[in-house]
Amino acid sequence: MKNPNTRLQALSGANAKAPRAQTKPVGRQLMTLPEQIAERIFHAIANGEYAPGDRIREETLAEQFEVSRGPVREALRILEKDSVVRILPNRGAHVTQLSVKEVDDIFEIRRVLSGAMIGRLTVEEAAQLAATVDADVRALDTLAQDPGGGAAYFETSFRLSRIFRDACSNERLAEILSSLARQTLRYTQLGLSTPARRKESARNWRTIQKALKAGNVDDASDAVEKLIDDSRREAVRQLEARPTV
């Protein structure tokens, strides 16, 4: 049997790099094959390879990954749980549509839970987290000044969010936030699509990092909530500005 990582190269073409075996938070096992496939499908959706409403065909992905349809079907169920796809009877899996109501609903949940996650850090944990994210926050400061740095900015901010989740000692809360990050990713991309918004976001990240470094977890929690709410507001603005079909 081929290595699962080799099979996963096919999703984004022959030149795509296979993902490294990814670890979950401490105490959890390596990602299963369906979880790895779900991750690759998810990134293909986020990268625009599938548009909202597009069908994702099990048989095509099974052939590309060189697996049976079972792991692909499980992967799609994972994405359905995260509201990334909908599995319709006799019609298969389709990428979910973007909507203002969904933005408001899931960003509100993510904002409250993310603020709570930061607020429960000890002063020592906050200082350690501040040191861990400092280099990436400085990178955001630089990328925000580059009008063409949108993709790199988004990738760095997404990595920062993952670092924050990994620092959470409540494993269940970290799992919920990870699911919410998937659900909000396409909206977050909208919310960071302009240079002005990236500059605002970078200022928010710097405020978070400084508050954590000073041990002011309440201020850091408030800044995290502002970061997420600013992204929600811009995503809603852009969705409302789209022409209706």
Image: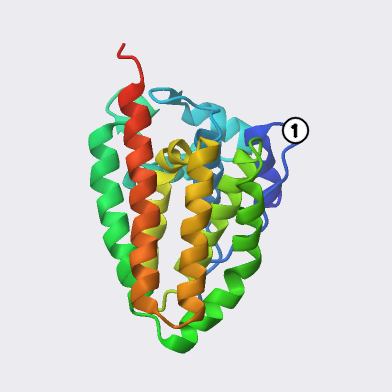
Q: How is the image coloured?
A: rainbow
Q: Amino acid at mark 1?
A: Ala
Q: Percent from the top left, x then y, of residue 217?
A: 38, 78
Position of the C terminus by quadrant: top left
- 110 or 42, nearer to the observer: 110
Residue 85: name its quadrant: top left
Vertical side of 183 occupied by 173: above or below: below
Q: What residue is drawn where x is 48% and y is 31%?
A: 58
Vertical side of 162 occupied by 60: above or below: above
Q: Percent from the top left, x then y, of residue 55?
A: 42, 23
Q: Secondary structure at mark 1?
A: loop
Q: Residues within 10 Å of mark 1 (few under 14, many from 20)?
A: few
Q: Percent from the top left, x then y, of residue 161?
A: 49, 60
Q: Percent from the top left, x then y, of residue 215?
A: 44, 83
Vertical side of 25 occupied by 18: above or below: above
- 8 or 47, nearer to the observer: 47
Residue 41 seen in the current view: no
Residue 23: name its quadrant: bottom right
Left or right, 209 with respect to 105, comes to right
Residue 32 seen in the current view: yes
Q: What residue is drawn where x is 50% and y is 60%?
A: 205
Say which residue label 1 marks.
14
Q: What residue is drawn where x is 65% and y is 34%?
A: 12
Left or right, 16 with respect to 144, comes to right
Q: What residue is drawn where x is 53% and y is 29%?
A: 48
